[in-house]
Image (cartoon, rainbow, N blue to C red):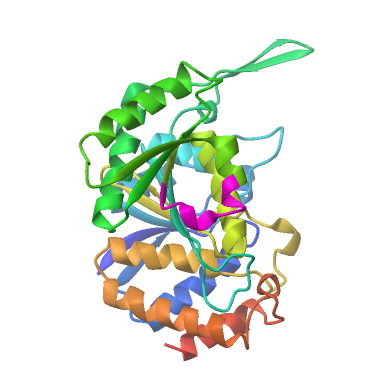
């Protein structure tokens, strides 16, 4: 039995968390939950959206499953996601993007993985107000972070029988920062002759992804580009409702969906738990519970393929509970 930190988040987070926990319990996952509240709902009581107890729990358990947490736009507290990644040094953000049978999309041959550097770039949050008309944000790229994310990407490619790694940048403009990132990926590629190494500018990548996404396999990117491109790739395969993610460090991993907290549908029993469930499936594999993960994945894909009980964002009219119950019955 493995103890895992569970962060239900806010917005639709608690609803989809309940759904996923029910499915994992029904499948017999060997997990005990250490539930820790975080996000906008705890600020009034504890003065911060990310209490110290949450960090301590993850450090103790080494693995966490996290639902979405609201991040205010343009004001308010900093992103809980960014704080978690920096506090725990979760330097690799892993976001697979693959078609699921039963979900109609413009493309039916997408199978790629985004490896996003997770700790620096503009997300370091180094900003200042120069005067009332001018603000400045500093982009940080280091050799250490670039080398280790490149190493992660190539290791992932080898372990998962991938053929190609594209390093993504805007080094024609950001010659020093993105140039350093490319130098590091190129140096790392020399250690992996069995993996084809290519480089591409991020704007060209975006154009090609919406024309020929089947050309791409593993993409390794600095933080900001990785965030943007991963949402684009989610759109290729059916949207954020099925977009899974993981934040991985040397000995700690936090699994979470890519989408936000969707406060506009909070409490309406219409949220889609698929992205969090797919993230939980990857967590089970990470924990060595691959048989259980496969059973849940099979039941999920059967539910989607049948199309009888899908949530609104998947072109259905089922409630969260109806969708969850159908997946459990398909186990």
Camera sees residue 309: yes
Q: Quadrant of residue 32?
A: bottom left
The image shows residue 172 at horizontal and vertical percentages of: 53, 22
Q: Is residue 194 above or below residue 270?
A: above
The image shows residue 4 at horizontal and vertical percentages of: 34, 60
Say which of 240 and 111 sits in front.
111
The image shows residue 256 at horizontal and vertical percentages of: 47, 56
| Farthest residue, direction right | 133
Q: Is residue 326 left or right of residue 119?
A: right
The image shows residue 74 at horizontal and vertical percentages of: 72, 33
| Farthest residue, direction top | 131
Say which of 250 and 101 sits in front.
101
User: Which quadrant is home to the N terminus?
Assistant: bottom left
State the extent of the magenta-drawn residues as a range. Answer: 208-218
User: Which quadrant is home to the C terminus?
Assistant: bottom left
Count of marks, rendered view: 0
Residue 172 is one of the magenta-drawn residues? no
Q: Is residue 111 left or right of residue 152?
A: right
**Which residue shows up at 60% across the image and 36% down it?**
203
Say which of 103 and 11 sits in front.
103
**Which residue shows up at 22% across the image and 47% down it?**
194
Camera sees residue 50: no
Q: Is residue 214 above or below residue 278?
A: above
Q: Is residue 20 above or below residue 212?
A: below
């Amino acid at each position: 039995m493995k103890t895992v930190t569970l962060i239900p988040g806010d917005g639709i987070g608690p609803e989809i968390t309940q759904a996923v926990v029910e499915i994992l319990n029904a499948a017999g996952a060997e997990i005990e939950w250490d539930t820790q509240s975080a996000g906008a709902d705890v600020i009034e009581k504890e003065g911060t959206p990310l209490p110290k107890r949450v960090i301590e729990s993850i450090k103790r358990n080494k693995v966490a499953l996290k639902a979405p947490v609201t991040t205010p736009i343009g004001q308010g507290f900093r992103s809980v996601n960014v704080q978690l990644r920096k506090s725990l040094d979760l330097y690799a953000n892993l976001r697979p993007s693959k078609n699921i049978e039963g979900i109609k999309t413009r493309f039916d041959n997408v199978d790629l993985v985004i490896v996003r550097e997770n700790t620096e770039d503009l997300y370091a949050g180094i900003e200042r107000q120069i005067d009332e008309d001018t603000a400045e944000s500093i982009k940080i790229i280091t050799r250490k972070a670039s080398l280790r994310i490149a190493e992660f990407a190539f290791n992932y490619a080898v372990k998962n029988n991938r053929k190609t790694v594209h390093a993504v940048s805007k080094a024609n403009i950001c010659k020093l920062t993105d140039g350093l990132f490319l130098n590091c990926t190129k140096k790392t590629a020399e250690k992996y002759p069995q993996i084809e190494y290519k480089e591409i500018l991020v704007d060209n990548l975006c154009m090609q992804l919406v024309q020929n996404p089947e050309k791409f396999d593993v993409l390794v990117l600095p933080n900001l580009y990785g965030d943007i491109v991963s949402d684009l790739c989610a759109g290729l395969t059916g949207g954020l409702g099925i977009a899974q993610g993981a934040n991985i460090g040397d000995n700690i991993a936090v699994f979470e969906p890519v989408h936000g907290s969707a406060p506009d549908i909070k409490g309406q029993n219409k949220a889609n738990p698929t992205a969090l469930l797919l993230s939980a499936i990857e967590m089970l594999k990470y924990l060595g519970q691959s048989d259980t993960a496969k059973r849940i994945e099979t039941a999920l894909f059967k539910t989607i393929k049948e199309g009888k009980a899908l949530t609104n964002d998947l072109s259905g009219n089922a409630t969260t509970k109806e969708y969850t119950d159908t997946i459990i019955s398909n186990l």
